[in-house]
Amino acid sequence: MSRILIRGGLVVTAAEETHADVLVEDERIVALAATGSTAAEGWTADTVIDATGTYVIPGGVDAHTHMELPFGGTHASDTFETGTRAAAWGGTTTIVDFAVQSVGESLRAGLDTWHAKAEGNCAVDYAFHMIMSDVTEDSLKEMDILVEEGVTSFKLFMAYPGVFYSDDGRILRAMQRGADNGGLIMMHAENGIAIDVLVEQALAAGKTDPRYHGEVRRELLEAEATHRAIKLAEVAGSPLYVVHVSAESAVAELAAARDRGLNVFGETCPQYLFLSTDNLAEPDFEGAKYVCSTPLRPKEHQAALWRGLRTNDLQVVSTDHCPFCFVGQKDLGRGDFSKIPNGLPGVENRMDLLHQAVVDGHISRRRWIEIACAAPARMFGLYPRKGTIAPGADADIVIYDPAAEQVMSAETHHMNVDYSAYEGKRVRGKTRTVLSRGTVIIDQDRYLGRAGHGRYQTRATCQYLV
């Protein structure tokens, strides 16, 4: 039996902050006691970690990543090995990636393909959502089986006609099935049919630069699709989780639905909180680095997103990590913005950017842990195994130095991509030590982990539903 004792840090969870010692045995947290109390006096351990002056926080849970995702004739540049290693460097100890059903194939075939990509390669723990690209009677029946097996969330797309797109009838059928079997429907809410018309018109007018990606994917078309998804979920009696919310009007749709008591949830991402259309408009094709969908919005939308996070109209911050190198991948779209692979790198940056939001006064320390650790774990059936520091929880623990300063850069990050979306950004706070299920995998700028340490996690159904 291996025992680790973490002494003297400020333990921060979504519920409370307390100066406490944390005792780990093997893979689990077994006890907490106030620092200096008699309860902790007799504790012994093989390894003692001095956490004085730092925060002791749960490992981050990034509930939206796309490792090795095929897209636009190429694939995301991070493998499960490189992507989960980068996650660990950034203080994230669990990812939930997306297995993809191809049109004409079963859900099982897609899930098996993603298991083969990930198994034996992950540095941290992982789970899967299921992308439904082909809603049929057979795939609807398969949803029941997957929920029983612990794959309890299903993503559908109102965007990308001809690739992932589902029409309203198929979406309604999937929502009805989710209402019956407990599966949570996740929605990419953009009106893809209308967007394709605007793309065609923009290109015909010679508008080919990356900035037009943001202009054709209009805010109104995100708001309209969000509204429509909410109404379809209401008809089906289904919960709904809207991914990568970027626009003020879409937040308003979610807030109005929640005010009416609907089980509607929203996620945003660091890129929408810290980047904007100014980045998409960078000259010399640099804007291609920032092409993602939903797109970056004008800066004034950021205030609405922060407000949504404070009021709990947005519950989760995930990354939608889907990196493509600038050279050789993003540049497939030179002369035609519609051919730029959609996606940004960010799995390594999320915890630090959100801590900077604490420093800047946007959110509290506990809210930081709520939106980055506890809420995603609860939303996707991983809590309290993940997302908190408590007896019985997995010993996924980050010792975080709130005073350290760092400058984000492609030269120093560990993601397998040739640029940083936050190049040159100075932030306060840095991961010092990371434990994954009781094993130290990052310590003082040294990587001690290994591919294959990460374990697949079956999930319960959404824990926010009554």
Image (cartoon, rainbow, N blue to C red):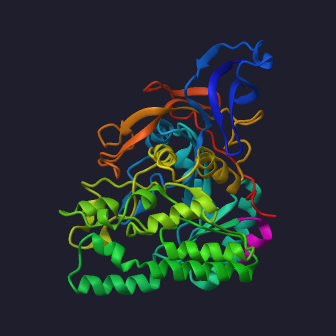
Residue 137 visible in rendering = no
Quadrant in the picture for the N terminus: top right
At 50% from the left edge and 48% from the top edge, which residue is drawn? 354
Check residue 179 for magenta coloring: yes
Is residue 396 toward the left or the right of residue 215 in the image?
A: right
Judge whether residue 334 can be spotted in this image.
yes
Residue lying at 77% horizontally and 65% vertically, measured from the top left: 182
**Which residue is situated farthest in the front direction here?**
361
Task: Give the quarter of the image for residue 12.
Answer: top right
From the viewer's side, name the closer residue of 50 and 143. 50
Percent from the top left, x then y, of residue 249?
A: 52, 77
Quadrant including the C terminus: bottom right
The residue shown at (51%, 50%) is 361
* 3 is higher (above) or lower (below) than 431: above
Decide whether residue 207 is among the magenta residues. Answer: no
Magenta segment range? 176-183
Vertical placement of residue 167 versus 452, above or below: below
Pick the residue in front: 129 or 210: 210
Give the percent coordinates (x, y) of residue 22: 70, 26
- What main secondary structure does the magenta stretch of the protein show? helix
Residue 279 lies, with reference to residue 46, above or below; the image says: below
Q: Is residue 297 left or right of residue 264?
A: left
Judged left or right of residue 199, residue 248 is right
**Residue 167: image location, x then y, percent:** 57, 83
Residue 275 on image: x %, y %: 38, 59
